[in-house]
Image (cartoon, rainbow, N blue to C red):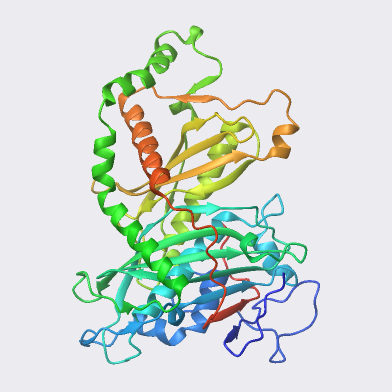
Amino acid sequence: MEFNCSSPNTIPVVSTFASPFDNSTAGNGSTRKPISLWPGMYHSPVTSALWEAKSQIFERLLDPPKDAPPQSELLTKTPSRSRTSILYNFSSDYILREQYRDPWNEVRIGKLLEDLDALAGTISVKHCSDDDSTTRPLLLVTASVDKIVLKKPISVDIDLKIVGSVVWVGRSSIEIQLEVIQSTKENSDVSDSVALTANFIFVARDSKTGKAAPVNRLSPETEHEKFLYEEAERRSKLRKRKRVDIIEFQNGEVNRLEALLAEGRIFCDMPALADRDSILLRDTRLENALICQPQQRNIHGRIFGGFLMHRAFELAFSTAYAFAGLVPCFLEVDHVDFLRPVDVGDFLRLKSCVLYTELENPDQPLINVEVVAHVTRPELRTSEESNTFYFTFTVRPEAKAAKNGFKIRNVVPATEEEARRILERMDAETLTQGSMILTSHVIIVHDETQSLSYVGYSGERQS
């Protein structure tokens, strides 16, 4: 499927680095230099494209007018005002293709998570902007990410499109829905072209006081937009009562804890008699650490949320790979809450483990990986949780078929704390599945007011 990027509303992005197999020059007659961005802005192909497309809005955020008043009157905007799309010309751009290729000739999911967060942030800024250079812009931060679901593998050789818009607003919160679209000429059915869906929730803060700030209202126009608004409203109510539901779900927890701990005690007390098809949770752990650098911060000076998701995904993938012994296949990211911001200079520790496995379906065994991010301050002797990510993987069918006698192990806890984490995650997953309305038929591909034809960028950091 070829995407049309020649409409009047399309914003072309010229490649910043020439292919080694192409001696031609950029459209202005000479090979372009890398884009000169504001110091500290996170460098990636998509953030560069979004920066060029909406540089005036972002410049106000980076250098807000001193002592400027807040927005005096809230506006009412339609979803089409914020709708934005990004086009990846994988089929024709060698450099871009190589930047996103993973070892299995698919798109690197970690990099795609970065791009989703960057696009969602831009959409939230567009919705909250009042187009008045004399007012104080809002500070918009990622509050949470609803479940991100991969519906089919994403090829790196076929053009790809991400489309998103605001679907719901509260008093100071905004929900953005994004869809990754990829299809071939043989399969041009729009309903089958959605490869991934995601919903991001942003919250608005006054950039001077730091307190919650009201955002522009949303007025859905079409029946489809009204349907999306109602669905988002239902999800908002669900999030508010989820904690109460989980507490109710945990009645009878003592018996469930005992059942989970029974096998773990055998591992600890009588390891020679332990089930060979099981493994202790602690034996699946991996960990890495990093110092957060100025180059990883966003326009608000905090570490870019997409960067954190990227690093968490890479660790989760490695954990699942080491656990299964075969190449894992990503399925979804469950709801993620951003509990505290991460700043430049923070010592970030990422700890992962296989929390539990689901083996009921032998054709698609599920590996549930937990990644916890801690902001550690050695000089203060403190360590605070920043994010907890839950990734679900399975094993690639072709890899499983090539390995005779392949079997995924059951994971068992050795401590009560580990057992409680498993139960809490299982309960949360059950509640989500029980109340989730499938929206796989929802496609946002019409009436786009902004489109980014995305060709390539050379100055990024691969992590």
Percent x, y of residue 244: 23, 44
Q: Is residue 368 left or right of residue 153?
A: left
Any part of residue 416 in sight: yes
Percent x, y of residue 323: 56, 32
Quarter containing the C terminus: bottom right
Residue at 44% in and 79% down: 82
Residue at 50% in and 55% down: 310
Percent x, y of residue 222: 45, 77
Relative to 131, say whether 362 is above or below: above
As drawn, which residue projects farthest toward the front? Answer: 223
Q: Is residue 356 left or right of residue 139?
A: right
Closest to the observer: 166 or 458? Answer: 166
Q: Quadrant of residue 352?
A: top left
Q: Quadrant of residue 447?
A: bottom right
Relative to 336, say whether 120 is above or below: below
Relative to 106, say whether 257 is above or below: above
Q: Is residue 396 left or right of residue 337?
A: right
Percent x, y of residue 68: 22, 88
Q: Is residue 84 left or right of residue 297?
A: right
Any part of residue 457 in sight: no
Q: Count the marks: how many?
A: 0
